[in-house]
Amino acid sequence: MSRAFVKEDGPEPSEDPPEKPISDHPNYVTHRGLRGLQVLEERLTSDLSALSGIQEDPQRHKRKRHLERDLRYVRARLDAAIPVDPSPINEVRFGARVVLRRDDGLLRTMHVVGEDEAEEGGEYVSWTGPFVQALFGLKTGASIEWKTETGLERWTLVEIDRR
């Protein structure tokens, strides 16, 4: 008899989606970032409530497991949140909005924010990124050199404030 269609003994594969990794960095948040996490928690809670009671449908069951995982992640981030006071600043640090100019004249505006608030390739950048870390402590007029795939770039801090 062929064993090709016989169920092997062993543990069943888990129905749970893998947990989202939690950063080892302190969870500094702006007021905007904190509110974003709170709104996300409310939405996930509401979406979960809408799915309660109906477990027969495998797709709904799977969706519920993902929502539960996402809610655990958001609640862990909220529990670890460290709001940062938006006091006036004169150097690059968490919560700052900075304008940089590259030597070729390109301007770039960045808001230094928490990891959950950062956007991939956008204006809101995580405070944990290496480029942002290199800017910390700089004041208007200061410059840094940054090595990229295309060579060395020089960036000058044109403006800094908190918005």
Image (tube, helix red, strand yellow):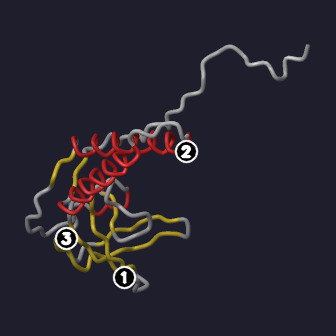
Inter-mark Cα distance, 2 to 3: 53 Å
From what the image shows, is residue 69 above or below residue 2?
below
Give the x, y percent position of residue 69.
Answer: 40, 40
Q: Is residue 143 left or right of residue 120?
A: left
| Element class at badge 1 | strand
Q: Which mark is residue 139?
A: 3
Inter-mark Cα distance, 1 to 3: 17 Å
Residue at figure coordinates x 8%, y 64% from the top left: 87
Q: Residue lying farthest left?
A: 87
Inter-mark Cα distance, 2 to 1: 47 Å
| Element class at badge 3 | loop
| Element class at badge 2 | helix
Q: What residue sits right under mark 2 in the picture?
A: 59
Residue at figure coordinates x 27%, y 63% from the top left: 112
Q: Which mark is residue 107?
A: 1
Q: Are marks 2 and 3 in contact (CB under 8 Å)?
A: no
Give the x, y percent position of residue 70.
Answer: 39, 45
Q: Nearer the viewer, mark 1 or mark 3?
A: 1
Tag 1: residue type?
Leu
Residue at figure coordinates x 27%, y 60% from the top left: 113
Residue at figure coordinates x 27%, y 42% from the top left: 75
Tag 3: residue type?
Lys
Of callouts 2 and 1, the N-terminal one: 2
Of callouts 2 and 3, the N-terminal one: 2
Is residue 4 or residue 108 the one in the foreground? 4
